Amino acid sequence: MNGLWRRHSVILGLAAVLLCSLIAFFGTRAMTDYYLDKAAARSSNTLGLAVTALRGQLDRYEKLPELIADHQDIKDLVVNADDPVRIDAINRYLKTINDLLESSDIYVMLPDGITVAASNFDQTPTFVGENFSYRPYFTDALAGGKGRFFALGTTSLKRGYYFGAPIRVEGSIEGVVVFKVDVDAIESSWRGGDYEIIVTDPEGIIFMTGRQDWLFTAIQPLTRGRLARTSATRRYANAQLKELPVSRSSNAGGYDLLTISDERGAREYLAVTETMPVADWTVKVLLDTASARAQALTVVAALVLLVGLGAMGAAAWLQRHARIAERLQVQREAQELLERRVEERTADLASVNARLEEEVAERRATERALRKTQSDLVQAGKLAALGQMSAALSHEFNQPLAAVRTYADNAALLIDRGRIDEASDNVGRISKLVDRMASISRHLRNFARKPNQKLGPVALDDVVRDTLEIVAWRLKAADAELAIDLGTVPPVVRAGSVRLQQVLVNIVSNAADAVEGLPDRRIDLSAARIGDNVAITVRDRGPGVPEAIAERIFDPFFSTKGVGKGLGLGLSISYNIVKDFGGTLSVEAHPEGGTVATIVLAADVLPVREAAE
């Protein structure tokens, strides 16, 4: 019996080792591909946002060179390029437009490539007198097309995207207007994430990245042909180009895997790619695969551990079965012996019976111990599952719970000091945070649904208070003062509380942007009842809204802010929200300076609560 048990144990051990090896080999590959696929999905979302932001920035300036090229003064300049009065006037005109649009540079070139006027005419170095005829944006525009080119400025040594437009005078091209857009603001938003975003030119050279040590490095071999084409256009001026050590592979899902070696060591990245044909760019999002591989190894290790525990349990069961069979055999032999010698060995029989009873008791004790062990294993499995769930939810609940703890401690101190009203406010905030945590699960279910918020009476003072909490950081950053005047009896309007709060956040934030850095940084927020309506006004002391752009202020993607400071959607969204409320939103210049935004909504009354008996 012992020999049979040993054979079974050897077979079971070999099977367990084989199964663990198969799980380790195939499981690691399968789980790695699974987590890499999930990482690729996240990277694809990030890539889509990055490409959308880049296209939005470029599209914003797409038509401006053509508008400037069509200006009559510009046409007169290229025809009379030796007129110093015209040159000075155009220089100042270009500087004004450049400052207004917060672009990098605007300049006018003659057909021979000489720059005759530039927005930086009063700076050192200046583009005036420089010859940029080697640039593709000039040659393409001079040929009647649209000049588009990204390069490092040979004079300014600053990167930028160049738009070129031909200057047509009576049907012939007499010059080119060039518009340069700075990209540093876009690039700075890519730093600090768990991914790397790079943009490469047709030669594979990285010219935009959150990693400054990768700038002007190539992920493709720098062949003579590539270097010659780059040098011909002087795309990167005198920048030192070098190859980034890269090795390529792919996973079962077909995603590119790049192993990049630098001073930090060798790291493997999962790369997702999208091209921008108009700009002739290639955008890549690189996600470090270390996390995905670690997750895969953790899962495989858990599976191997489970198989090992299962094999140990099976071995214990075989051993127990062998011992029981052996004991039964002993019992049978003893019983036969007792039957033959019952008369002469009565004393021995009694002793054997006693030993059998002890063995049965031992067997039962062993069975009870095994049952308890099995119960403990089941309980351990439950605890492991709870641990996995808590790890998944901890990120979503940590911040609200920390805030609840702080409010609770403050409430206790306030109660001890007799400040019951303030303690009650803290308790109310705790309740709101608890509601927020409860809403997390609802958001997972309702994320894809279109909001359907009904209109009703909204107390304006509550909305303004909540708005102030949200924009407090922006006001502090701008060192702005928000003066609120809602009258002796704050009005009640018919709207949606959350959406009205969103409108006020957008408008007050715009006002903070407008007054930042100015001597007078006061912002007034007031509300007054006018007949059946309530007028809410927000006035700043900023530069105001020029008449030339007043009609476009609510257009989507239209913004007077600089590159990377907004997508131009805030006022457009606010306009449509107020329109959904049945009200109006207008923005105009204030007679005493600055801008005033006016929201007109229907007045309403809060429902009367019945007094308790």
Image: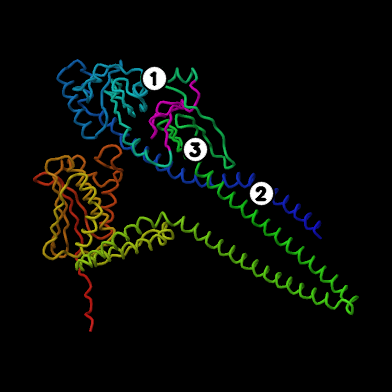
Residue ID for mark 1: 233
Q: Which residue is mark 2?
A: 20
Where the N terminus falls, by quadrant? bottom right
Q: Is residue 285 above or below residue 399?
A: above
- The span picked out in magenta is 196-222
Residue at image location 47% in from the left, 21% down from the top: 226
Residue positioned most to the bottom: 613
Label 2 amino acid? Cys
Labels 1 and 2: the sequence-earlier one: 2
Q: Label 1 amino acid? A: Thr
Image location of residue 215, percent across then percent down: 40, 28
* Sequence order check, earlier mark of 3 and 1: 1
Q: Which residue is denoted by mark 3 in the rendering?
A: 271
Q: Residues within 10 Å of mark 2 (few under 14, many from 20)?
A: many
Looking at the image, residue 103 lies above or below residue 80: below
- Quote the CA–CA distance across marks 1 and 2: 59 Å
Quick one: quadrant of the C terminus?
A: bottom left
Type of amino acid at the residue the image marks with label 3: Ala
Q: Earlier in the sequence, mark 2 or mark 3?
A: 2
Nearest the eye: 275 or 21 = 21
Q: Is residue 613 left or right of residue 241?
A: left
Where residue 592 appears, as percent x and y from the top left, is 8, 45
Instruction: Kindly state the secondary structure of the residue where label 1 is placed.
Output: helix
Image marks 2 and 3: residues in contact by CB distance under 8 Å = no
What kind of element bears circle 3? strand
Residue at the right extreme, as displayed? 340
Residue drawn at (45%, 17%) of the image: 228
Q: Residue at x 43, y 40 (%)?
A: 195
Query: Which mark, residue 434?
Result: none
